[in-house]
Image (cartoon, helix red, strand yellow):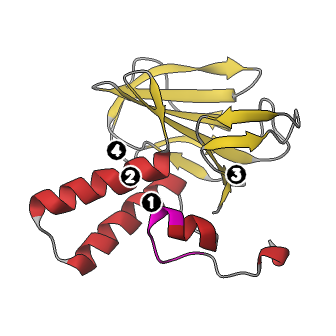
Amino acid sequence: MRINSGFGKRIHPVTHKQDFHRGIDLQARNEPVYAFFAGRISEVGYNPILGKFIRIEKDGLECIYGHLSILLVSKGEQVGSGEFVAVTGSTGRVTGEHLHFSLKSNGTYLDPVSFIQRYYQASINKENIMENSTYLNLRQKLELLVMMEEVALNEQESILYGVDFADREDPEDE
C-alpha cells in the first residue's frame, strides 16, 4: 500500500483547489483496517466528505479513518491496538477507493508519519535499543499505519521520513 496523498498543502483531487490535507490517503482496495492504538470508539458514522468513518480516542490522542465500506465497531466500544475495526472503501468525496487516516492530539492535526517517527525515536532514545532493532520497530509501526505487510513510499517520502525502504519504481510508472 502506498501513500497517495500526504499531510499538508495539496491540490484536492476532487475540487482541484489548493487545500490543507489533514491526514494521509493510503491506496487500498477492500483491505482490513486495524486500530492504530487501544482506545474508545468516540464516533462512527457517515458524512459527505469522509463517507463512512471511525474515530478512536485515548488520552487526548485521536485517530480518524475515512472512506470505509464496512464498519465493524460501535460508538462507545473499547478496542485493542491492532483490532480489526473496518474495511476500506470509496464512500464520501473521493476519486477512488483508498483509506484516509488522520491523527489529532488535543484537537490539533498531526502528520501521521512524522508522529510515528518521533514516537519511535523517543522510545528508542529512552530504551537505548540497538540501531537494527530501532529500524525494525519503526518499520513495524509504519506497517500497522498502512494496514498491510509492507509500506511503499516514493523516494522523496523515504528521505523526508528518514526510512530506507522506499518504492524504487520509476516515477513515470506509478
Q: Residue at x 45, y 26 (%)?
A: 108
Residue density around tag 3, few if under 14, some if 14–19, many if 20 or more, within 10 Å: some
Q: Secondary structure at mark 3?
A: loop
Start and end of the magenta stretch? Answer: 160-166
Rounded to the nearest angstrom, the CA distance separating label 4 from label 1 is: 14 Å
Q: Residue at x 24, y 75 (%)?
A: 133
Give the residue type that dot 1 points to: Leu
Residue behind mark 3: 30
Rounded to the nearest angstrom, the CA distance separating label 3 from label 2 is: 24 Å
Q: Secondary structure at mark 4?
A: loop
In the rendered structure, does residue 55 fall within the stretch colored magenta? no
Of circles 4 and 2, the one toward us is 2
121 on left or right of 116: left
The spot of residue 57 in percent (x, y) is 38, 26
Residue behind mark 1: 142
Q: How many marks?
A: 4
What is the number of the mark on residue 4?
none
What is the number of the mark on residue 81?
4
Q: Upstream in the sequence, badge 4 or badge 3?
A: 3
Q: Secondary structure at mark 1?
A: helix
Rounded to the nearest angstrom, the CA distance separating label 4 from label 2 is: 15 Å
